[in-house]
């Protein structure tokens, strides 16, 4: 986290109880430690999560052992012209099983957000009725931010509307979605019992986008311009779809451009992971792949790693529900099973038309 997220010792005046009005915080997960009016006439509210322990995102074990505490500043809804900032005393707990620290969840803001969700919702509502520039000026944020709030709010509304039509929300066990941050809170709120799964198609598509950049940059370099002329498809197509001749030709080009070859191998390794990993070993193999990308991969692939952190649990959950998602593989019999699963997992050409597929009452 950048330094600017942390403020220390900026306190000026403590709010005197007799001289101020009391407004409920309305965020039941937090308790207020103190509050004051900052140097710039903004209200700073120091808060801490009430829960004394949190579940480790890796293994699920509850931990109450605080590793460290950091202050995070989040903009909240304005009160009578006063900008409000929550200073969250965010704890990192140490998991005794994994022996690693993890940061506590922040449901009021969401991961990597510098504002509370209700602040963004309010901006979205205002931007529905008034020009974006006016809202931006009034709230003192950038127009881009208002625009993002507006589109997130719309998407969220659509999802909530869709989910409200379900007759028995508790019967929904799995929700498969792409990695749009705006869907996740809506689904979590409407379907608390459902496991969110990010489908392999979206993950591979995301990595392919980065790989395309790598390939195209090599096709423009003097070492690659002739070699890759009219041959890029050999690197883009799935390995198993190449003819023997194509395979040989691709390998020949790869041998001349080792950095591109490495990127191609990493792209294919992710596809193989989807085709072969199981619930038991998926996390371990994913971590090994991430490490390899970090150590040997080109910049574009390294930059594409963030969803593997932000959506890790949802990406790994794919393997938990593999029998449903690739159910054909199971009816075709045991011997064919692995082969069919490979084909299904590799077959990311089966595009899903719906951005969100809800599997009702799926039985595992
Ligand atoms: Zn753990």
Image (tube, rainbow, N blue to C red):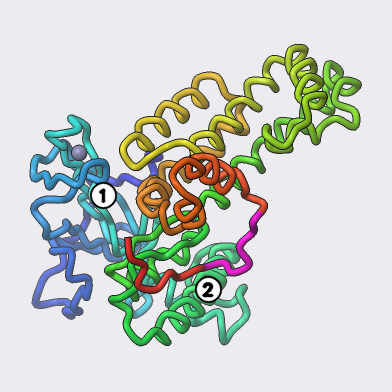
Query: In the figure, is residue 181 to the left or right of 35?
Result: right
Label 1 CB, ligand 1: below 8 Å?
A: no
The image shows residue 17 at horizontal and vertical percentages of 9, 73
Residue drawn 34% across the image and 58% down it: 74
Please, is residue 171 above or below residue 140 in the view? below
Q: Earlier in the sequence, mark 2 or mark 1?
A: 1
Rendered residue at 16%/67% (across/down) = 15
Residue 272 can be seen in this image: yes
Q: CA distance from mark 2 to mark 1?
A: 38 Å
Q: Position of 206 compared to 25: left or right?
A: right
- Residue 282: x and y in percent read 38, 37
Residue 214 lies in quadrant: top right
Left or right: residue 248 versus residue 16 is right
Nearer to me, 144 or 248: 248
* Quadrant field for ligand 1: top left
Would you place residue 190 above or below residue 352 in this image?
Answer: below
Residue visible at 12% across and 60% down in the picture = 50
Tell me where residue 262 sits by quadrant.
top right
| Residue underneath mark 2 | 155
Label 2 CA crowd tier, 10 Å (few <14, some 14–19, many 20+): some
**Which element carries disc 1, helix, strand or loop?**
loop
Residue that badge 1 annotates: 10
Q: Is 326 colored magenta in this rendering?
A: no
| Observer-nearest of 362 and 255 | 362
Q: Residue 266's x, y, as percent?
A: 58, 28
Q: Mark 2 touching mark 1, by CB under 8 A?
A: no
Instruction: Tell me which segment is drawn in magenta.
Output: 350-356
Q: Secondary structure at mark 2?
A: helix
Q: Name the foreground residue: 301 vs 349.
A: 349
């Amino acid at each position: 986290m950048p330094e600017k997220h942390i403020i220390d010792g900026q306190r000026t005046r403590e709010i005197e109880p007799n001289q101020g009005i009391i407004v409920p915080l309305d965020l039941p997960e937090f308790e207020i430690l103190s509050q004051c009016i900052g140097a710039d006439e903004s209200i700073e509210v120091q808060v801490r999560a009430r829960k004394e322990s949190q579940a480790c995102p890796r293994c699920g074990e509850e931990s109450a052992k605080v590793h460290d505490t950091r202050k995070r500043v989040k903009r909240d809804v304005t009160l009578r012209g006063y900008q409000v900032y929550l200073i969250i005393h965010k704890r990192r707990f140490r998991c005794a099983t994994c022996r690693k620290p993890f940061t506590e969840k922040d449901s009021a803001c969401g991961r990597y957000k510098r504002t509370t969700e209700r602040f963004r919702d309010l901006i979205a509502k205002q931007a529905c009725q008034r020009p974006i520039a006016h809202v931006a000026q009034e709230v003192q944020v950038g127009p881009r931010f208002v625009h993002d709030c507006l589109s997130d709010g719309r998407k969220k509304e659509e999802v909530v509307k869709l989910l409200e039509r379900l007759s028995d929300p508790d019967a929904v066990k799995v929700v498969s979605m792409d990695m749009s941050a705006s869907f996740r809170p809506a689904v979590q709120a409407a379907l608390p019992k459902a496991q969110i799964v990010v489908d392999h198609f979206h993950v591979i598509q995301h990595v392919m986008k980065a790989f395309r950049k790598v390939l195209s940059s090599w096709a423009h370099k003097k070492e690659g311009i002739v070699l890759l002329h009219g041959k890029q498809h050999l690197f883009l197509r799935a390995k198993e779809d190449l003819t023997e001749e194509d395979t040989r030709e691709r390998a020949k080009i790869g041998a001349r451009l080792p950095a591109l070859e490495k990127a191609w191998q990493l792209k294919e390794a992710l596809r193989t992971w989807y085709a072969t990993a199981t619930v038991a070993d998926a996390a371990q193999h994913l971590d090994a792949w991430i490490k390899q990308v970090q150590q040997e991969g080109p910049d574009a692939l390294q930059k594409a790693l963030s969803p593997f952190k932000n959506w890790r649990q949802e990406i790994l959950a794919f393997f938990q529900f593999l029998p449903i998602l690739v159910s054909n593989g199971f009816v075709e019999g045991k011997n064919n099973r692995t082969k069919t699963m490979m084909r299904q997992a590799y077959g990311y050409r089966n595009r899903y038309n719906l951005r969100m597929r809800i599997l009702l009452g799926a039985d595992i």
